[in-house]
Amino acid sequence: MSNLRKSLSSMSASLVAILAGLVAGFVILLFSNPANAGKGLLTILIGGWNNGMKGVGQVLYYATPIIMTGLAVGFAFKTGMFNIGATGQLMVGGFVSIYVGVTWTFLPGAFHWIVALLMGMLAGMAWGMIVGVFKALLNVHEVITSIMLNYIALYGINYLVKNSNLFDSLRNQTVNVAATAVIPKAGLDKIFYITKGRLNDVSSVNAGILIAIALAILMYILLNKTTFGFELKACGYNRHASRYAGISENRAIITSMAIAGGLSGIAGALMYLAPASGLHIHMEEVLAAQGFTGIAVALLGMSNPIGIIFSGLFIAHITVGGFYLQSLKYMKEIIEVIIGLIIYFSAFSLLVRDLIAKAGKRRAKKGNQPSKQEAVS
Amino acid sequence: MSDYIIEMLNITKDFPGIRANDNITLQLRRGEIHALLGENGAGKSTLMSILFGLYQAEEGEIRKDGKPVQVRDPNDANALGIGMVHQHFKLVHNFTVLENIVLGVETTQHGMLRMEEARQKVMALSQQYGLLIKPDALIEDITVGMQQRVEILKMLYRDNEILIFDEPTAVLTPQEIDELMRIMRSLAAEGKSILFITHKLAEIMAVADRCTVLRKGKYIGTVDVKSSSPQELAEMMVGRKVDFKIDKEPAQPGESALRVRGLSVEGSHGDKKAVNNVSFDVHKGEIVCIAGIDGNGQSELVYAITGLLPSTGEIKLNDAAIDHQPIRKRNTAGLAHIPEDRHKHGLVLDYDLQQNLSLKRYKTEEMQRRGLIRFDKVRAYAEELIDRFDIRSGQGPVTSARSMSGGNQQKAIIAREIDINPEVLIAVQPTRGLDVGAMLYIHEQLVRVRDEGKAILLISLELDEVFQLADRILVIYEGEIVAELDPKQTTPQELGLYMSGSKRQEVHA
């Protein structure tokens, strides 16, 4: 009962933040082009549905990596660590999976993508673990190391790609992975498409979204149902008491960062194990945005793995909506502003939660039902 | 003019799941010392927080000089002349005494500080009330007793007439307590009105004029202290007759359960050892008490034995060396630890009660299967302990530990540690900040554990507790054991001499 109430009240806080963000976004739409503002807001809210089932598929496609990085940030946060390095872990994971996807063609077709995915995960784990080791053994703050490691990942990968047979110099990006290494569609292409003339225009969504959701559920179980999760959360809440109880804080920090890195690594693998028309690592000096969006997703989802599924879907939904805003002569960056505002408001979630609690109390008083029994039950 | 300088009439305050104050009335006369007595969770702190503007009451009225007033925040309280010395002092540690006193009400001219005027006023007040301070010393360098005097001067400097003292003696030595009592009397003699929150009956008898008693959030009554007795006050507070003495048979020590030889711990500043070459034994079936003034190495000694701090030397539990074992191994080998700081070490405040009760047990066969926690067992275990140790909380096993009262938090820790069925139980200030009822209960539990043949190492700053419980007293001074005493053949005065380092004997373990 109390658990349900707790999750309801934290959810309502996120919902209020979203609402406030959308209202503020509407104001921005009004300022930049008043005539289309109403339509624009509707476009954002409709999101993927603007383009039928293909659009919905695109929402799932965009949600996949940010759910994964959201999990990476949220999971570490439960252990008291701020994992700002999801982007670096994602790139390292993506790079290694591309490497496996391109070169390990000796693997039987059915296993190729799985091995590539797992290798990406392991690479991300190693990358995340470095942060944990520095924190646990040398007491170096995780934000410092992960920021540094982000750039090491970025430039290191650029260097490695340019000096290897993974480089497509014509497009200034990585070469295509073998067809056997592409994440399979798992039948989702039969659902998420629109018909254009005689052809089916198929969405980019693939089995990645199913993997992301499954992993979110797995993380939920790990955190809430296992002794391992009990220890990790105890360390996050109070490391002194955890040490006192005999929990090894160092082990908790290292394993939690390794798991977080692994989740980001999978995000990278799911992004880059894509067909020729899909994503490649570009040789640019830009950190992958999905890593940072993960922070937003985790915040909005209150670091709860199940909440993160929904917040990831939501952010993907309005991001896709943002693309369609362009047809109304808005810049698609407006959607980034709105997402930023929503995150800003959800950072006030505690305040919002208090306000909701107070409002609830006032209502209870008005109804003249001193709900003492209810509070005890 | 009204008889009363401050009145709190029919105050009611609700917190989620609990009514902290239920129709409470408190009337403070001008120039009196008025004690507010109650067990933990009786609502004393809540009531004072309402008076000081930290909480708003749902119902009721506050009057000053008979006129209703609003206290929305501490600034309002200050404007009404209400000042408070909190249990945990609110001082800036790297500021001087003088700077702390004037902080927030600095005298300035053209934006520049005028410290000389402030200094004169502070020194005058210091003389008038006999509050000895060093105005230019840093807070971090002065004793707790002087810090408290700084807090009192802060109130006087702001011309407060109503002074609230929240558990002021909890952190003081016996001599400092006497000094505080003297100061309180002189403040009252100068016309200040004092509200004195406490649960120590002796202090009420010594200094208070009247006493208001609360129990479980309800108003029980207000009595004249002169025409009352400690027994009567205790009964009002607890709601039944209380025995002050616990029955304790002479100890029958068995073989050594905890053996410490040549134990040393490095000091945090590196210059001096916090624990220096300490050796002693605790035998089965005895309570050994380490007495000393706070900060003489007690905490470090306990941390070394329990594994929270690295140390050199030998620690044996039932003949097995544990000095290089990780903490969990020591715990499972039979070491239980009631920590000094229940919020820092004892509890995960964001976990609920059942999670905290299983904090050292969640890995046992009973509570998990292949790494999955068996929540039904965790809950059943929590319910059993709650029942057996009478732990009170708003929502039973799923109450957030943070929302529980201090006494019940401590009960939860004690339940958890005793139920491990340890070989050695280390209890550090197990009754700190607790009321008579809870204190008595905890003392009984400790004696019961002793009588089951367990070894108990008790660290206490309260001499009453030392004499009440100890079968043997070891005195610690500057990290060294300076005396071993038999509580039956020594006096608090003599113990005090050893504790302050003015006397020492050769001690051989």
Image (tube, coloured by chain):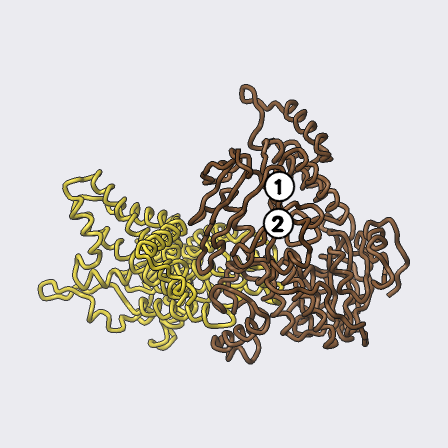
What colour do you see for chain B?
A: brown
Q: Is residue A257 left or right of residue A8?
A: right
The percent coordinates of residue A35 (x first, y second) are 14, 41
Letter of the chain that mark 1 sits on in the rendering: B
SS for dot 2: strand
Output the chain of dot 2: B
Seen from the viewer's position, the closer of residues B427 and A139 is B427
Give above or below for B423 relative to A35: below
Residue B416 lies in quadrant: bottom right
- Which of the two marks, 2 or 1, is nearer to us in this view? 2
As drawn, B145 above or below B230: above
Observer-nearest of B118 and B508? B118
Q: Where is mark 1, residue-wise?
A: B194
Q: Locate residue B322, reporting x and y percent.
A: 73, 70
Amino acid on which disc 2 is placed = Cys
Q: Residue at x 48, y 42 (%)?
A: B62
Marks 2 and 1, how far apart in space?
11 Å
Label 1 CA crowd tier, 10 Å (few <14, some 14–19, many 20+): many
Q: Residue at x 63, y 67 (%)?
A: B414
Q: Residue furthest top?
A: B110
Residue under pointer 2? B211
Relative horizontal placement of residue A226, taking residue A282 as reference (left or right): right
Q: Residue placed farthest to the right in the image? A: B506
Residue contact between numbered discs 2 and 1, judged by CB atoms under 8 Å: no
Q: How many numbered discs sit on the rendered protein? A: 2
- The answer, for residue B133, to whether it is visible in the render is no
Drawn colour of chain A?
yellow
Q: Position of residue B486 (x, y in %)?
A: 85, 64
Q: Position of residue A139 (x, y in %)?
A: 59, 54
Helix, strand or loop at disc 1?
Answer: strand
Q: Residue furthest left?
A: A197
Crowd tier of the residue under label 2, counting other residues whose Cα lies within 10 Å: few below 14, some 14–19, many 20 or above: many
